[in-house]
Image (cartoon, helix red, strand yellow):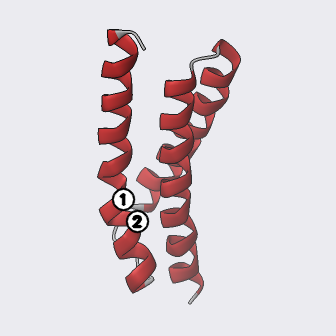
């Protein structure tokens, strides 16, 4: 693995891991303190970047955005359930 890919992989792991505590807290408490507009924009942007990175074949960027979209989508689902309840 080349040094650029290693740097990208470390960056990906750090960014994805930054969402982990919030996602765990959201799942445990079934409450999401994040702003709804922020979550919607984040999920949309991460999803579009996931598609883009797939098209260009950048698998580190793909994994980063897929995992970010997945974790923020969990927060979105909980936030939507809060609004219904």
**Mark 1 neighbour class, 10 Å CA radius: few under 14, some 14 to 19, many 20 or more:** some
Would you say residue 58 is visible in this rendering?
Answer: yes
Which residue is depicted at the point 54% across and 35% down? 63
What label does residue 23 carry, if any?
2
Q: In this view, does 41 lie above or below 37?
A: above
Which residue is depicted at the point 41% across and 51% down? 38
Q: Is mark 2 on a helix, strand or loop?
A: helix
Which residue is depicted at the point 51% across and 46% down? 67
| Extreme residue in the bottom direction | 85
Q: In the visual, does 61 lie left or right of 28? A: right
What label does residue 20 carry, if any?
1
Where is residue 33? Give x, y as percent.
33, 71
Q: Quadrant of residue 59 in the image?
A: top right
Where is residue 16? Give x, y as percent.
38, 45
Where is residue 6? Give x, y as percent.
35, 20
Closer to the camera in the image, 45 or 74? 74
Q: Is residue 55 above or below residue 14?
A: above
Closer to the camera in the image, 47 or 17? 17
Which residue is depicted at the point 48% across and 45% down? 68
Q: Distance between the residues labelled 2 and 1?
A: 5 Å
Mark 2 touching mark 1, by CB under 8 A?
yes
Q: Quadrant of residue 84 in the image?
A: bottom right
Q: Is mark 1 on a helix, strand or loop?
A: helix
Would you say residue 32 is visible in this rendering?
Answer: no
Closer to the camera in the image, 59 or 78? 59
Q: In the visual, does 77 lie left or right of 13? A: right
Where is residue 70? Give x, y as percent.
56, 53
């Amino acid at each position: 693995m080349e040094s650029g890919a290693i740097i990208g992989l470390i960056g990906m792991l750090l960014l994805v891991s930054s969402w982990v505590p919030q996602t765990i807290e959201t799942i445990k408490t079934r409450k999401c303190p994040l702003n709804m507009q922020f979550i919607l924009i984040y999920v949309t942007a991460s999803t579009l970047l996931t598609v883009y990175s797939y098209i260009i074949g950048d698998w580190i960027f793909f994994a980063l955005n897929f995992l970010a979209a997945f974790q923020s989508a969990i927060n979105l689902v909980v936030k939507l359930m809060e609004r219904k309840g």
